[in-house]
Image: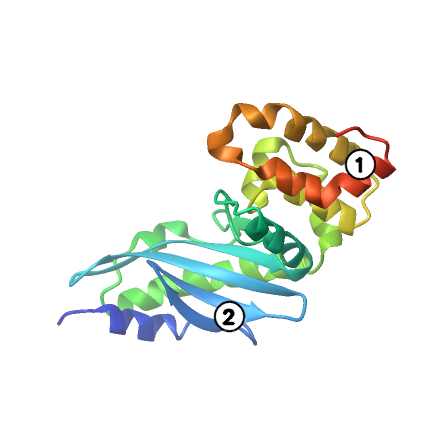
Amino acid sequence: MVYNKADFKRHVETIKTTNGFKLKSAVQAYLFIRKLNDRTETITLSYRAYAPHGFYIDGLSVDIHFNEIEDILNPILDRHQIQNRYGETTIQKSLIDVRDVDYSKLQIQINNNETFNVVKKEVETIILNGALPFFEHYNGLQNVSKTIENLNEEELSIFISGIVGIKIPLIKKLAQSNSFSEELKNRNEFYTKEVFRYPQYFKDHEKVFNELFTADLKALKISL
């Protein structure tokens, strides 16, 4: 008997998350989305289809869209017609090292109830021990700001979704971080000098940075 996408979707709909998440189909993924007053939390379940043979789970990840950040930034990005945005959410994480998960079982081909249930058990454990604690911990910008204090540039580029050099000082500003002024100074160095060496990646990003932070730079007596 052929196991098709409708069968797979029906099975995915049985995965337990918690109250408030709604399922949405995407390209090679299913999204569990929860909209709250100040943020949107998303669990992404990525998969590969080998119709009519079955499906494989590629992995799970999470992201949070903080309205406080994105509602400020996105209109400015639109105004300057920025094409290279590198993500529409605020923070993200791939759930590749969650405790008590047998990741080898995610390699099982799903083609019936029995195989799906084996994989489903691990997926639900990833959600319970990985996704939900992530959302609970990062329920506001204060903990986001604390985390980025301890990350290097490579780690920041993985944790922060979007234009890292702009989002980090904006997060620190809104979280009233003690390191905001130093962060702004360092990012200003980039957006007044080095950014112009890489127009293919950062075209017009300095315009967004200046519009967001000119008043702050002047207040801190940092020259543009």
Q: Amino acid at mark 2?
A: Thr
Q: Is 140 or 211 nearer to us in this picture?
A: 211
Q: Give the image location of residue 92, x and y in percent.
A: 55, 50
Residue in the picture at 52% in, 35% down: 203
Helix, strand or loop for disc 1: helix
Q: Is residue 118 above or below residue 172?
A: below
Question: 81 or 160: nearer the eye?
Answer: 81
Q: CA distance from mark 2 to mark 1?
A: 44 Å
In this rendering, position of residue 18 left or right of residue 191: left
- Residue 217 is marked as 1
Q: Residue 182 in the image: x percent, y percent? A: 79, 32
Looking at the rendering, in which quadrant would you find the N terminus? bottom left
Label 2: few (<14), some (14–19) or many (≥20) C-alpha neighbours in 10 Å? some
Q: Is residue 183 above or below residue 146?
A: above
For marks 2 and 1, the one nearer the N-term is 2
The residue labelled by disc 2 is: 17
Give the camera-side residue of 144 and 194. Answer: 194
| Apparent side of residue 123 relative to residue 73 in the rendered image (left or right) | left
Residue for point 56% across, 26% down: 196
Tag 1: amino acid: Leu
